[in-house]
Image: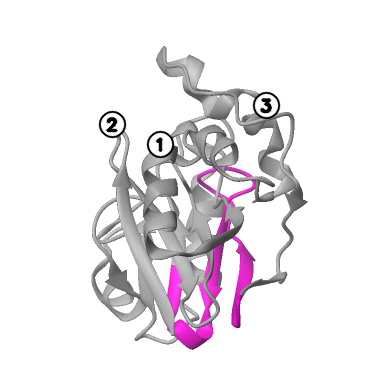
Amino acid sequence: MTTILPLTVGALETNAYILADEARGDAVVIDPGWDGERIARVLRGRGWRLTAIWLTHAHFDHLGGIAALLRAFSPPPPVALHPEDCWLWKERGGAPLFGLEIDDPGPAPDIGLSHGDALEVGSIVCEVRHTPGHTPGHVAFYCPEAHALFSGDLIFRGSVGRTDLPGGDWDALVESIRSEVFTLPDETRIFPGHGPPTTVGEEKRHNPFVR
């Protein structure tokens, strides 16, 4: 059985997600933006093995909990990020721009994501969709069997990600939504980086930023 467990973490109320194959006991964490120790406790409490950390992008509020998660498990799980966001990873997610400090997530991610990659957690298969605009290396994770898209900061309920930070591109963001989100079945659930979930059909009909 596929389980999606959302956890709201950090001062910016980032949605971190645990995606688990309960039958096999395998799980990944998507965007552990803060509270790595808390996420680790949840995983242990459920008896799940953490097999990887997947990042939609490398802003600090999506990777700030990585260092604690890596410390909590031996061997530490691999971290997956699109190469075009590695510059942001090296800048600690841009935290210093906001006068913030986060634990060093490490020298480099372990896995470089590419558009079309198939990622597995247990028997669950997710497709990597490169969705630049919020950042150059932003991706979304589409899990067809679960009818779920983890959209990071690409699209939210009734809104979209900001493009005024370094590497942002409004035209690219809109094109990413049209080509990589709105082409999915309307019933696909969107699990965003902030705020409540929505569906592809709902956003196609009502999102005022993309027509």
Residue at position x 57%, y 39% from top? Answer: 58
Residue designated by label 1: 34
Q: Amino acid at mark 2?
A: Ala
Mark 1 crowd level (few <14, some 14–19, many ≥20, 10 Å Cα): many
Residue under circle 3?
Answer: 90
Return the x and y of residue 91 as percentages of the image width and height.
62, 23
State the CA–CA distance, disc 1 to disc 2: 9 Å
Q: Is residue 105 left or right of residue 59?
A: right
Q: Give the SS element for disc 2.
A: loop
Question: Which quarter shows the C terminus?
Answer: bottom left
Q: Is residue 81 visible?
A: no
Q: Earlier in the sequence, mark 3 or mark 2?
A: 2
In terms of image quadrants, where is residue 125?
bottom right
Amino acid under label 3?
Answer: Lys
Image spot of residue 116 (x, y percent): 71, 71
Q: Which disc, if any, is residue 11?
A: 2
Q: Position of residue 193 (x, y in %)?
A: 38, 52
**Is mark 1 in CB contact (under 8 Å) with mark 2?**
yes
Residue drawn at the location 42% of the way across and 16% of the way down: 100
Q: If you read the primary sequence from the N terminus, does the residue marked by circle 1 or circle 2 appear first?
A: 2
Q: Residues within 10 Å of mark 2 (few under 14, many from 20)?
A: few
Alpha carbon separation for disc pair 3 and 1: 17 Å
Magenta highlight range: 122-149
Q: Is residue 44 above or below residue 101?
A: below
Instruction: Name the foreground residue: 172 vs 107.
Output: 107
Q: Nearer the viewer, residue 120 or 23?
A: 23
Q: Is residue 140 left or right of residue 100?
A: right
Question: Residue at coordinates 48% horizontally, 58% vertically from top-left?
Answer: 174
Quarter of image, res 202: bottom left
In contact (CB < 8 Å): disc 3 and disc 2? no
